[in-house]
């Protein structure tokens, strides 16, 4: 591979890390707000199908998750492996993010490409506190009669 081709490849790889995804991943709410004001599409996907919500949920950034949900992003967006933001939040043990996503209508029964639900992912990592939080939110929803698909956060 020549230096020029190598450089072009590296620049293309860097371009895939768009500013919105970086801001969501590294918990920079100010930049997310600025990019939103500039008209950036909040549901855009990278080469692996991830959205800014996937990035924020995977890293436990509740304020960015709330911001994105309040702007109507798809809480059930699938990445290339059919993981939703909820799969990643459960897998990584981000309890408050898990609660917020469920209340915003995230589907607990979606299967990823490994045939696992978000609950399965939490169990895989031994995240019993996540399971407890899911049960608590589910009980609240059941008691209040909230339809999770129409909840506004």
Image: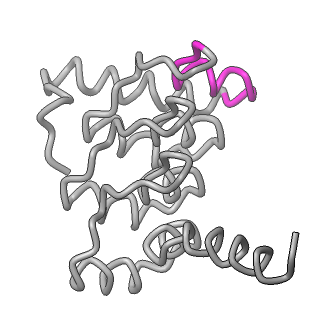
Q: Is residue 102 left or right of residue 90?
A: left
Q: Which residue is depicted at the point 36% across and 39% down?
A: 77
Q: Position of residue 107 (x, y in %)?
A: 34, 25
Image quadrant occupied by the N terminus: bottom right
Comparing 145 with 116, the one in front is 116
Q: Is residue 61 left or right of residue 138?
A: right
Comparing 133 with 13, the one in front is 13
Q: Position of residue 61 (x, y in %)?
A: 50, 62
72 relative to 32, above or below: above
Instruction: Quadrant for residue 66, please give it.
Output: bottom left
Q: Is residue 46 left or right of residue 141?
A: right
Q: Which residue is depicted at the point 55% across and 21% down?
A: 119
Q: Which residue is depicted at the point 53% across and 36% down?
A: 80
Residue 122 included in the magenta stretch of the image: yes
Comparing 69 with 22, the one in front is 22
Q: Which residue is depicted at the point 64% across and 36% down?
A: 91
Comparing 114 with 102, the one in front is 114
10 relative to 145, above or below: below
Q: Give the tally of numbered discs.
A: 0
Q: Is residue 144 left or right of residue 110?
A: left
Q: Position of residue 87 (x, y in %)?
A: 53, 33
Specify start and end residues of the magenta stretch as a single range. 115-127
Q: Position of residue 136 (x, y in %)?
A: 41, 27
Residue 13 included in the magenta stretch of the image: no
């Amino acid at each position: 591979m020549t230096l020029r081709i190598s450089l072009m490849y590296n620049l293309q790889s860097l371009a895939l890390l768009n500013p919105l995804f970086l801001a969501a991943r590294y918990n920079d709410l100010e930049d997310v707000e600025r990019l939103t004001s500039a008209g950036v599409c909040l549901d855009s996907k990278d080469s692996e199908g991830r959205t800014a919500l996937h990035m924020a949920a995977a890293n436990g950034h509740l304020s960015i998750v709330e911001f994105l949900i309040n702007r109507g992003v798809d809480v059930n967006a699938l990445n290339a492996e059919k993981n939703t933001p909820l799969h990643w939040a459960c897998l990584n043990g981000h309890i408050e993010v898990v609660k917020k996503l469920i209340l915003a209508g995230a589907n607990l029964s979606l299967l990823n490409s490994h045939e696992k639900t978000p609950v399965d992912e939490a169990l895989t990592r031994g995240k019993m506190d996540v399971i407890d939080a899911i049960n608590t939110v589910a009980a609240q929803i059941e008691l209040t009669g909230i339809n999770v698909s129409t909840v506004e956060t």
